[in-house]
Image: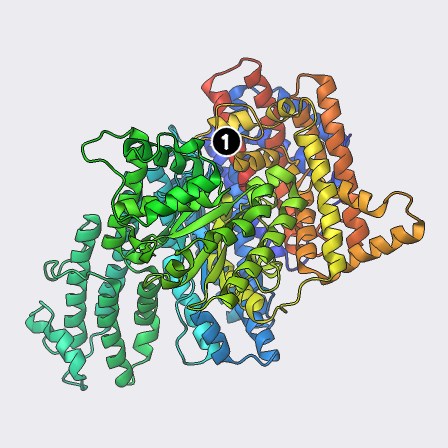
Amino acid sequence: MTQRAPVPTSSPFSPTERPLVEDIRLLGRILGDVIREQEGDAAFALIEQIRQLSVSFRRHADTAADKALNTLLKSLSSDQTVSVVRAFTYFSHLANLAEDRHHIRRRAVHERAGSTRPGSIEMSLAKLQAQGITPQAIRDMLARSYVSPVLTAHPTEVQRKSILDAERAIAQLLTARDDILAQASAQHVAHDALTPRELAANEAQLRARVLQLWHTRLLRFSKLTVADEVENALSYYESTFLREIPKLYANLEQALGTEPVHSFLRMGQWIGGDRDGNPNVNAQTLTHALSRQADLVLRHYLTEVHYLGGELSLSAMLMDFPAEMQALASQSPDHNEHRKDEPYRRALIGVYARLAASLKALSGGDAARHAVPPQNPYLTPEELLHDLRVIEASLLGQHAAALVTQRLQPLIRAVEVFGFHLATVDLRQSSDQHEAVMTELLATARLHPSYTTLDEAAKCVLLQRLLCDARPLRVLGHSYSAHAVSELGVFEAAKDARKRFGSQAIRHYIISHTETVSDLLEVMLLQKEVGLMHGTLDAQARCDLIVVPLFETIEDLRNASQIMREFYALPGILAMVQRGAADQYGEQDIMLGYSDSNKDGGIFTSNWELYQAEIALVNEFDGINQTTGGHPIQIRMFHGRGGTVGRGGGPSFEAILAQPPGTVRGQIRLTEQGEVIGSKYANPEIGRRNLETLVAATLEATLLHPTESAQPAFLESAAELSLASMAAYRKLVYETAGFTEYFFEATPIREIAELNIGSRPASRKATQKIEDLRAIPWGFSWGQCRLTLPGWFGFGSAVEAFLNPPAASAKLKKQRLALLQQMQKQWPFFSSLLSNMDMVMAKGDLALASRYAELVEDKRLRKKIFSAIEAEWHLTAQALELITGDKERLSHNAALQRSIRHRFPYIDPLHHLQVELVRRFRAGQSDDRLKRGIHISINGIAAGLRNTG
């Protein structure tokens, strides 16, 4: 039978793991009790039998248990199958919650011991201090910085909000349980009668929430709408971002001294503005998304102001108030006699009334409480900040700082960061859609009968001429196509949204598949058409939206710097960007696509081309800034990373530090996608820790990293490895006859496409071509069948070719291996990439993958493709061992080792069941229970693997 990658599987648990084991056992026992109560003893016994066989096979490589397991699973009825799949899916969810709790628990242990961890702000600041970098230098750097995680909706986010809410409640109960045990441990009493009662009450609450989960539908009846995706994203702001980001700033300010820190960390969103391949996104969804964002953030402010009013009961009869504070109180419409000596309360009632009026104006919503009617809305966040700072200054002047730090300062920081818009919504569309609109506009205006037939030079000449012409393109009274009306409607909605919600509400326009300079000019001209571009290109032009190219394929990445050089060489472009606007002075974002470049050229080549593209782009803009006058252009890389390593995923801290030296400079945006959003941000404390890693990595990458390039020998070796890796990858994926058929039969891609997990289609076109398949379901499918192919394939062949050039002597081979080992130890790019491959292969499983291969009807094709994949797997495992010296996966990642040891035995049955259900479904069985079982198994596996999106 096919062997698994060696991962340590010793069964004894260390003392540090025991609390995790106890939590998993507790939640497993409660789930088992619920199943027995709700489904009967027979159902529980069946699930327990499958669990025991799975654990035996996983932990002890018991082939007899494996055989018995498969025989048992094949004998199950559809009803039994769904019950078993639900049980193991929910167990995956519960194990994740226990693991998250243990992560927080271990972090607290280290902090109490005074031990800082890599990725923490404390350790990064200590490193900076050791290098003689002062707190003021750090504050100055942060004042010029812009760090932004951007939440995106993609067709791999399988969690329903109802499930997320129930799981958050369970997570809170696990935290409360730890608190009970900690208090009991601190008491040291001979007979503790209280703790058992408290633990019993806590367990009863856990049981209620698990019962709720068991009877909460995992799947959606209908396909997710954009509005649903907006609500899912907003739940993370409620649970995490609105409160944890101010805490992060407070911790940073405390570490750096008393001086304030600029609000450099801000949130971004694609949901509601990302039209690329999603016909469901339009002007209405954009307006809806921003309205809902405003509603959420304003209600948060209203709640905080209400509680602040309750806390600030300070009387003017007992202390003096400055004139500005008295003036703010006197402006309040609150004239209640009972509060006439309480300036803070009167002022805050006025603030509340103005916020309530702002809520009504921006979202149509009504505030929950009204001491006085809503009136005189705040038009901007700055107006609100002014009033809050008057209150802050007054309290500080009264030596009442203790009343500032708990609620008022976090509120002020929240308003600075989130404004009235909550998060910056990016607009995105594919370049070919802009071209289609431009073709129609130009033909109707009789400016050119067939724009698409022009060559690139002619397009640029025409577009530049039109950008210098003050007249609009649209002809009054003409009926344009629905497509043109929709596309222009988005631009018009963006203009209105910036006016209503503030200029930070929409700042970026991302152009997918940017291949030419004209792709950028077209978006500028569309901005001009609706008034988002002011003036003309030859006379004080200014664009409201930053035009952001997205370079996705290997070829696009190689052409990126040349495209930007040609763009900035056009008359008026440099001056326009330097001129900028109040909120975007001299900025140029450039987005780099990890997913499509990986699907195009494989893991190593994708990463290498991204690395080279960043260096070339930074050098290009350094050259522009050195040779031209005026304000320097600030380049910012926007990393389109997914959840899987094949889509740029992996630990964010290491990924940022692995960027080419000199390319971060305090500027970074990166997407957060799929299940990664839930695993990173569903738990508030873990969410703050993950945000801290972004800040810590940005600090280190900006202030600690040398500006020198990697050694020439390293760069030359990477280029050689890239060529061989891409050749091996493309030989399998694009040049092997029958590979497409194999992929569609050996993975649940067809079933994934049917799952109601996103508003966006899985494929760009209605074909079964790998080229047309979106990179996200491509990676998701390989994760489901546990081959994780996009995260490692091609590297083994590349290393073998590198170590064995033609006529190579043993001495040369030894020297080349020593060079690779040196690269792994000294070059963050190479070591991070190998670490990610190590993680991906640890999560892969050839034994399980071979079961999926059995779904391929053509036995010769099955053998040919799977044998090639298996051979490359072993080559890659061997290459990693040769370079790193590690004989087992995850030798340097104890946390993930622990995770795999505890979670994966319970994911295995889901794979076996999924294969059996898919086989039945494809054989013609199509009852709803069967389909539901397949879809629940997809959910459970995705939850268990955690970064499959």
Q: Is residue 63 above or below residue 713?
A: above
* Quadrant where the N terminus is found in the figure: top right
Task: Pinpoint residue 12: horizontal percent, then vertical percent.
Answer: 71, 51
Q: Is 169 in front, or is 643?
A: 643
Q: Residue at x 25, y 45 (%)?
A: 471
Q: Is 420 in front, or is 404?
A: 420
Q: Is 316 in front, or is 616?
A: 616
Q: Is residue 506 above or below residue 724?
A: below
Q: In this image, 541 relative to 869: left or right?
A: left
The residue at which mark 1 appears reads as 936
* Three-letter amino acid code of the residue under disc 1: Ile
Q: Residue at x 6, y 73 (%)?
A: 337
How crowded pointer 1 is (Cα within 10 Å; few <14, some 14-19, many 20+) is rated as many
Task: Pinpoint residue 237: horizontal percent, then vertical percent.
Answer: 37, 53
Residue farthest toward the top in the current orientation of the protein: 924
Please name the colour scheme applied to the rendered image. rainbow
Residue 513 visible in the displayed image: yes
Q: Is 339 in front, or is 198?
A: 339
Residue 893 visible in the displayed image: no
Task: Pinpoint residue 608: horizontal percent, then vertical percent.
Answer: 65, 50
Task: Pinpoint residue 182: horizontal percent, then vertical percent.
Answer: 51, 65
